Image (cartoon, rainbow, N blue to C red):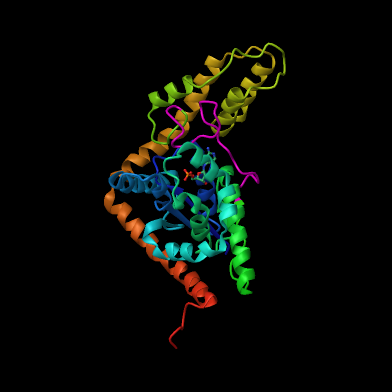
Amino acid sequence: MERVLSGIRSTGQLHLGNYFGAVKNFIELQNTHECYFFVANLHALTTHPDPKQLAKSVKTVLAEYIACGIDPNKATLFVQSDVPEISELYTLLNSMAYKGELEKCTSFKEKIKKHHENINAGLLTYPVLMAADILIHRAHKVPVGKDQEQHLEMTRNFAVRFNHRYGVDFFPEPQAFDFSGKLVKVPGLDGSGKMGKSEGAGNAIFLSDDDETIRDKVKAAKTNSGPTEPNSIKSIEIENLFTLMKLVSTPDVVKFYDDKYNDCTIRYGDLKKQLGEDIIKFVQPIREKIVDFENNDALLAEIAQHGAEKARKSAKATLDGVREIMGLTSIWQ
Ligand code: AMP
């Protein structure tokens, strides 16, 4: 059976971008593949989170995974820091990664521009830790959003380099995956690009947002004065609203507003109202389950412990192989 791995950072609550870029695929893949899904709390350390807040966030993401439909009896669900084998592989893979390629990585360049007061080594070697996450289970498929494409390419480079350096065929070359055949980028509501946890207030719709918050956020989304010529090209802000609509509304509804846009009779207030209600319809059942699971510490602990045991077994098998290949075992025999 092909192996699948993916994770989400515990830097806040999950939003529609996480759901449609990643989690939606997890739910499908858990029925047909050997799946490992984790809460990436080590990746969250680069921004120096408050320890109590970080621990709380881990529980939230775990509860949200389950509320979305990830079944811990089908998929292995674990917390990254509960599997120390990942950190050891990260150390070992660091020598496969070169400073130049790490510095050229788009996410690194973006982050140092935004946070020039905190350019730490963890940020630079983020793609190596991500490669360790994936390669520790020798995963074949990695369901992620479009923003992770470059990191996946780097993971393949490290895997190929390792195989070549040691003359082995040990690591598979993992591929980014989405059921639609195309990686997804869910736009934010502020017209600035992708939906993200820390892109500023109003950018993201969280799975835990209440109805009024959702209505307010969608209402405040940027629009323009509307088309004056039939069939005009949509501005980025309007295209973003249609992209969101295609995710949560029925095809009939999307067509209705598309036709109205094309014959210049569209009223953005109506479109936003419809979009808000369709997002609410989607989010509501998930939100209710999040509350249930978040309050069940005993269940979350049991799931995380069981998941860590299973993940460590798979991780140890890989690490034993890597240690052997690199000449780190049997030194004293
Ligand atoms: P992060 O929240 O950055 O840890 O991302 C976790 C997963 O969600 C990764 O697979 C990302 O590619 C995916 N993701 C995050 N934001 C978006 C977005 N706006 N559109 C599509 N996928 C996303």
Considering the image in quadrants, where does the N terminus appear? bottom right
Q: Could you tell me residue 55's position as x and y percent?
A: 31, 48
- Picture coordinates of residue 7 (x, y %)? 47, 51
Asked if one can make out residue 19 in the rendered structure from this viewpoint, the answer is no
Q: Residue at x 41, y 38 (%)?
A: 286
Which image quadrant is residue 147 in?
A: top right
Comparing 23 with 249, the one in front is 23
Residue 77: give x, y in percent of width and height.
42, 56
In-front residue for pair 217/320: 320
Which of these two is toward me, 94 or 192?
A: 94
Looking at the image, residue 61 sits to the left or right of residue 196; the answer is left
Residue 239 x %, y %: 62, 26
Residue 85: image quadrant is bottom left
Residue sitting at 48 percent across and 70 percent down?
Answer: 319
Q: Is residue 321 left or right of residue 101?
A: left
Magenta region, mostly helix, strand or loop?
loop
11 in relation to 280, above or below: below
* Magenta stretch in the rendered image: 177-202
Above or below residue 241? Residue 320 is below
Residue 328 among those drawn in magenta: no
